[in-house]
Structures are given as structure tokens and as C-alpha cells.
Amino acid sequence: MEMKMKIEMKMKIKIKIKIKIKIKIKIKIKIKLMMIMMMMMMMMMVVVMMMMMMMMMMMMMMMIMIMMMMMMMMMMMMLMMLIMMMMMMMMMMMMMMMMMMMMMMMMMMLMMMMMMMMMLMMMMMMMMMMM
């Protein structure tokens, strides 16, 4: 009887130890799983961060591009304005020149007329004298 009891006791202890070991193994596995999960999470985070960075970079690039475009547009506008101004100036000059020419012509015409008149007068005078 006593022997039996001892054996049973031993068996019980063994079972207990086995259970303990099992639990330990389970915990270990759990820890490993946790670690893997953590790693995965980290990786995901890194990927997300990378994506975010890429997005940011893209956004920045876009912004810069837009800015550049705007600048170009502005420059173009300025140039256009300048050209327009120049054109206007030229036109004005031309107009002025034309006006001047016209004036000159007019003056010339007047002069000619005057001369003619004078000549006529002279002629008349001469005629008169002759008479």
C-alpha cells in the first residue's frame, strides 16, 4: 500500500512538472508570437512612415512645381507687358512722327501757297506797272 502511495505521489509530481513545462512552453510560444507581432507592427509602421514620407515628398514636389509654374507665368506676363509697352511706345512714336510729318507737310503746303500768292502778287504788280 505504502509503495503504491509513493508511486502515485511520484506520478502526481511528474504530472505537475509536465504541466508546468507545458505552461512554460506555452508562455514561450506566446512571447515568440508577441515578438513576431511586434516585428510585423514595426515593419508596418516603417512602411507607413515611408509611404507618408513619399507622399510628403510628392506634395512638396508638386508645390515646388506649381510655384515654378506660377513664377514662369509671372515672368511671361511681365515679358508680355514689356513687349506690349514697347509696342505701345513704338506706336506712339510712329503716331508722333506721322503727326510731325503731317504738320511739316502742312507747313510746306502753306509755304508753297504763300509763295505762290506772292508770285501772283508780284506778277500782278508787274503787270500793273507795265500798264
Image (cartoon, rainbow, N blue to C red):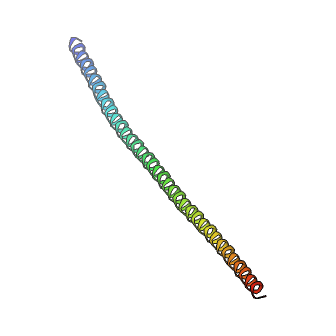
Residue 38, picture quadrant: top left
Is 120 left, or right, of 22 in this rendering?
Answer: right
Where does residue 30 sit, x and y in percent of width and height?
33, 30
Image quarter of the C terminus: bottom right
Identify the residue shown where x is 28% and y is 25%. 24
Where does residue 72 sit, x and y in percent of width and height?
47, 55
* Residue 12, above or below 51: above
Is 109 left, or right, of 29 in this rendering?
Answer: right
78 or 63, which lies in front? Answer: 78
Residue 95, picture quadrant: bottom right
Identify the residue shown where x is 62% and y is 70%. 98
69 or 58, which lies in front? Answer: 69
Residue 107, picture quadrant: bottom right
Looking at this view, name the residue that lies furthest to the top: 2
* Residue 31, above or below 1: below
Identify the residue shown where x is 53% and y is 62%. 86
Total labels drawn: 0
Where does residue 83 sit, x and y in percent of width and height?
53, 62
Image quarter of the N terminus: top left
71 or 94, which lies in front? Answer: 94
Where does residue 55 sit, x and y in percent of width and height?
44, 45
* Residue 70, above or below 101: above
Is 127 left, or right, of 107 in this rendering?
Answer: right
Is 12 left, or right, of 84 in this rendering?
Answer: left
37 or 25, which lies in front? Answer: 37
